[in-house]
Amino acid sequence: MQHVQGLKCLVCGKLHHPEAVDYVCPDHGDEGVLDVIYDYDVINRQFNKEYLLLSNDFSIWRYRPLLPVDPRIAVPGLSIGWTPLYPAQRLSADLGLKNVYVKDDGRQPTASFKDRASAIAVVKAKEKGARIITTASTGNAAAALSGLCASMQQANVIFVPETTPQAKIAQLLVFGSHVFLVKGSYDDAFELCLQATREYGWYNRNSGFNPYMTEGKKTAAYEICEQMEWQAPDCIFVSVGDGSIIGGLHKGLKDLQALGWIDKMPRLMGVQASGSSYLYAAWKNSEDILTKKPIQAHTVADSISAGLPRDRIKALAAVTETAGAFICVADNDILAAIPELARCTGVFAEPAGAAAYAGLLKAVDQQLVSGNETIVVLNTGNGLKDVAGAMQAVELVGTQPFRVDPDIKALQQFVDNW
Ligand SMILES: *Cc1c(COP(=O)(O)O)cnc(C)c1O
Ligand SMILES: [Zn+2]
């Protein structure tokens, strides 16, 4: 691959040959997260915005010359990416803002943002001739890998915490993965998966470990900018667990800047749950993320529950280098944001998806955004992923169904009271 120069360690800066290293810097263990480095001159010679105008591929593969995959390997048939970006007028008006947009990645084939990364994982695994792919996940990355593997007839082994919401476990079982429910946290599942990778030589998709996952996630930034006709927004709100999505958005925006396709870097706003706020705390207190100890994570937003964010180096850089911010929101605010976002836009988010919107509300409150800025809120997961969470949310805001006898007179009593 001519356009990939190497894999750069974010701890020591060493550039590794892509064929020499699969995951992390050999000199820095699991901390030595790698970044894929491109030759933008090579890319610019083969690819430009006009080429995209002519493309009828409405998936992440429309950006294939910007992705670290061998063009000879077939990509999955499932349609990944090019999710809608909705102008949210009513929501904007309610908040005293002018231009809020919602990008809905709940519309991916397995109903979360994670499909973008898993699509790259299955192609890399084919490239490397892997027999089995594995991942640890809070649920969505697993479901995404599971679905993509099913579409490619690829064997896979999944590790998720036993507390993972039912819908996500159902997806894994329906797609026919080998599923291990780990009696412990996501962090425990992650460690077990790493050990299995070393022991059995499986191909590993873990976020913040496999450097190519960022490259799948960055496609959302390309889409946002292309959908806005290459006028980059002023800020993007996204929820943060491992920090891999926000790192991916940053990477995508840096690519577009390097290519000269956008002339402004949006501020990246990372939203964490108050019970899983490792990165918020590190950012606020200027702590060293290479030595800061893991925390005990606990939040209703299971997808952003991470005691030790695996992609913390990229996540922190995403916020600091774009003059963005981390924002911390309470579980009740996350839950309340589910029906509020849904009622303003028709987009039904799982708790971690709605957290991004809860973060925007807090940012308005703290005057971190101003009225005429263009703001994108990224919904990362579909509300049907966590029905128990949704039911808790409507209960919290006092919405109930009415139980009625199948009789028009019984109904009339309710109607009379309105
Ligand atoms: C994984 C996930 C996130 C957080 O992404 P990180 O890369 O872990 O920060 C947010 N929302 C949903 C729905 C997710 O599945
Ligand atoms: Zn290193």
Image (cartoon, grey):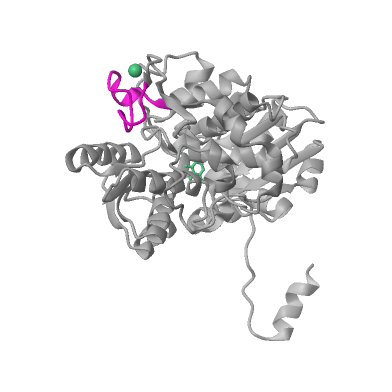
377 to 398, vertically: above or below:
above
Camera sees residue 38: yes
Q: Which image quadrant for residue 226?
A: top right
Q: In this view, does 149 lie to the left or right of 356?
A: left
Q: In this view, does 292 lie above or below 190?
A: above
Quarter placement of the N terminus: top left
Q: Would residue 165 be seen by someone viewing this image from the given angle?
A: no
The quadrant in which the C terminus is found is: bottom right
Residue 297 shown left or right of residue 360 in the figure: left
Q: Which of 337 and 377 is in front in this view?
A: 377
Residue occupying the point 37% across, 16% down: 14
Q: Where does ligand 2 appear, by image quarter?
A: top left
Q: Position of residue 396 (x, y in %)?
A: 59, 51
- Residue 417 locus on image (x, y percent): 78, 69
The residue positioned farthest toward the left in the image shown = 199
The answer to whether 81 is drawn above or below residue 361 in the figure is below
Q: In which quarter of the image is residue 367?
A: top right
Residue 240, given in percent of the width and then of the height, sits at: 51, 34
Taking the image as shown, residue 266 lies to the left or right of residue 371, namely left
Name the chief secondary structure element in magenta: loop
Q: Which residue is drawn at 63% across and 82% down?
A: 405
Q: Is residue 21 magenta?
A: yes
Q: Which of 66 and 239 is in front in this view?
A: 66
Q: Which residue is drawn at 75% across and 46% down?
A: 88
Query: What span is colored magenta in the figure?
Result: 16-35
